[in-house]
Amino acid sequence: MSFLKRLFGKRPKRVNIKRRFDLIGPIGQGSMSKVWKAFDNEVGRQAALKILDREKTDRFEARFERREKPSEGEIAVSLSHPFVVRTYEHGLTKDGEAFLAMEYLEGTTLAARVGAESEPDPGERCRWFIELGRAIEYLHSCRYLHRDISPRNSFITVNGRIKLLDFGLTIPLQKEFCRPGNRTGTANYMAPELIRRQQTDERVDVFAYSVTCFELATGQRPWQPAKSLDAMMHHMNTPPKSMVELAPKFGTEVADVIMQGMATDRDRRWPSMTRMLTALDQARPKESSPPTACAGSK
Ligand SMILES: Nc1ncnc2c1ncn2[C@@H]1O[C@H](COP(=O)(O)OP(=O)(O)OP(=O)(O)O)[C@@H](O)[C@H]1O
């Protein structure tokens, strides 16, 4: 069956990138790709063109041999949500590199906003948290795990809307993909069970999301930053910093919700994004602007 699927399955189309797109300038250099601001001459619109490093992508995909893992492009084009970057198209360049053509976003990643203000507005930040959380909740409802939630992969547009980026490490939320051993992500956001190579589930994204919220609220990491996974694991054997002490303006209720999302024992963590967002929505400052209505989320 899998042989037949490979033989007759839909192959990504080959595109002459140089002919079709005018590359206006580089906008991002990730660890796995280069992203360009581009103009799509065929469709007549601006786009963000992500071209994946072939060697690194092949090495990553080889981990899932025989498991029919959808590619980053296949996953990204299937997603449609107001807080998830829209991917118009994916394919292969003439040189065989995978590419994604996305909506071009004007703004910055949330990494640029960590610590940018000495006293961030709790109402505004909580709205960002909820929008980012809805994007992850939607991804889970599509039966995917993101596995690389961080401020670097969360974008704020010039209009103040949050967009979740980068499905390079995303896997189907199914037992065979989540089994022990598949250790990947960004060290400071990786849940202990991922570092320990245990079976994973939605709670790894709940953990990374909560660390992201903590950083955006306090300007600090909850644990001392670590370069290696073993060092990170060592730090996580000690209690995290206290959000209510570092950012008292957010109040104890919001702080408690976020701290529970970072519980190193996953059984003490929020079991799902939906449960965490219900609690966060109730706890957030009442004077803050409500999150944008969002048809695609639960
Ligand atoms: N649609 C977009 N519009 C504008 N900028 C974008 C868009 N997509 C990505 N970028 C920029 O390009 C950067 C790299 O993109 P992305 O995270 O998808 O690449 P990556 O190689 O998977 O990165 P990494 O693995 O290091 O997280 C982003 O941090 C962002 O600054």
Image (cartoon, rainbow, N blue to C red):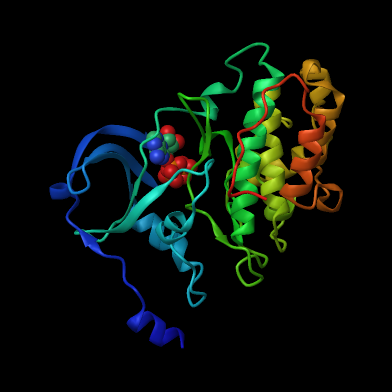
Residue at point 60%, 68% (across, down): 177
Q: How many marks?
A: 0
Residue sitting farthest toward the left: 19
Front-most of 256 and 266?
A: 256
Visible residue check, residue 241: yes
Describe residue 239's horizontal placement relative to residue 197 as left or right: right
Describe residue 165's horizontal placement relative to residue 232 as left or right: left
Query: In the figure, 61 relative to 258: above or below?
Result: below
Q: Quadrant of residue 170?
A: bottom right
Q: Quadrant of residue 122?
A: top right
Q: Where is residue 198 drawn, in percent x and y?
A: 72, 61
Residue at point 41%, 86% (across, down): 3
Query: In the figure, 6 relative to 106: above or below?
Result: below
Front-most of 10 and 115?
A: 10
Q: Where is residue 219 drawn, in percent x and y?
A: 66, 21
Visible residue check, residue 231: no
Q: Where is residue 108 drawn, in percent x and y?
A: 46, 27
Residue at point 68%, 54% (across, down): 194
Q: Where is residue 133 drawn, in percent x and y?
A: 65, 41
Residue sitting farthest toward the top: 118
Front-most of 231 and 242?
A: 242
Query: In the figure, 73 relative to 293: above or below?
Result: below
Residue at point 80%, 27% (across, down): 241
Ligand 1's quadrant is top left
